[in-house]
Amino acid sequence: MIVADRKSLQEILAMVADKKKILILGCKGCVTVCNVGGLKEVEILAASMKIARKKEGNDIDIDIQVLERQCDTEYVAGIRDVVGNYEAAVSLACGVGPQFLSEMYKDQTFYPGVNTTFFGGAVQHGIWEERCAGCGSCAIHNFGGLCPIARCAKSLMNGPCGGSSKGVCEVNKDTLCIWDAIVKKKMESGRLDDLIGVKPIKSWKTARDGGPRRSIREELVQGNI
Amino acid sequence: MRLSYPADIKIIQVPCTGRVDILHLLNAVEDGADGVYVAGCLEGECHYISGNLKARKKVAYVKKTLTEIGIEPERVEMFNLSSAQGARFAEIAREMTDRIRQLGPSPIKKKSHAA
């Protein structure tokens, strides 16, 4: 899923400091799963903002809505009739949400209430880790199912580097050296030779280096399926 | 026991403090409560295993949020006592009332009265 962190209350308050009536929009997708932009988080943010503004003697009227997904125009269209009733809106979806909203409702301003961070998963309750860099040409099977692009600080395709010490990355003591883990896994399974073969140089055209990406599924575009 | 405790406390009963939500506490503050406290069972004696421990974490979250807003976090508190400790219940009620009296009315209430 896409993982995000909520912006600080002060940062969000500053964004809408001159507004009196706003809409906070949650999303039932990834940000609900990573506990940052679902119904509960939207309600907590609304209550916290109302308290802060009341304290300043500058009350704010806040309505909330949680869309099924903010990355699908059919759900974004669901607020068509009400979106004009507000001076501004705060989206707690990943960076896709405020963009889809801004594209559909050109007269409204949508502020991002979260910082979108990475594609990852929860390794324990409350802790998420990056697992995928979205490079567009997956080859994790070559590395024992562990992605060196997303999980090596240098995205090395032939590691480990000299900064690997006792299985930990020199960049951050909380980061596992994924190349240490890859080599260990290959040794344990008796397949260390897999790493000796020379692999073709990775093409980064499919990654962000090739500019913004687009995925087209012809059969869906034509409506055949 | 017929113990008396301050009359300005409004009691909201829940089956277990695990039912208390961050929003319940925030909404009370938002509506102008000068203070809110949660009276849960003694730690380790929750009938539902961890309801009171969860409530403590939620109280801590609300304290953090209030601090961020610039409201005294002491206005929200968690207490633990057993249902057999009636005297302690009255004592906590007085303790919390005294604390809030020292802090004064909620800054939210003051502003809305002024307006």
Image: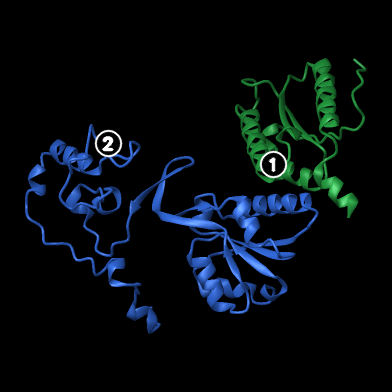
Chain colours: A blue, B green
Provide the residue designation for mark 2. A168
Q: Is residue A132 visible?
A: yes
Quadrant where the N terminus of chain A lies? Answer: bottom left
Q: Does label 1 lie on the same chain as label 2?
A: no
The chain that hosts pointer 1 is B
Q: Give the image location of residue A185, x and y in percent.
A: 19, 39
Residue placed most toward the observer, B38 or A62: A62
Give the spatial CA distance, label 2 vs label 1. 38 Å
Q: Give the image location of residue B55, x and y in percent.
A: 66, 33
As shown in the figure, which amino acid type bears the numbered disc 1?
A: Leu
Q: Secondary structure at mark 2?
A: loop
Q: Who's the residue at 67% across and 35% down the image?
A: B59
Quadrant where the C terminus of chain A lies? Answer: bottom left
Q: Is residue A1 visible?
A: no
A201 on left or right of A18 = left
Quadrant of the image occupied by residue A170:
top left
Q: Who's the residue at 23% across and 53% down the image?
A: A140
Quadrant of the image occupied by residue A139:
bottom left
Q: Secondary structure at mark 1?
A: helix
Compared with residue B115, is residue B106 higher up or lower down, i.e. above or below? Answer: above
As shown in the figure, which amino acid type bears the numbered disc 2?
A: Val
Q: Give the image location of residue B85, x and y in percent.
A: 79, 16
Circle 2 crowding by C-alpha within 10 Å: few under 14, some 14–19, many from 20 = some
Provide the residue designation for mark 1. B66
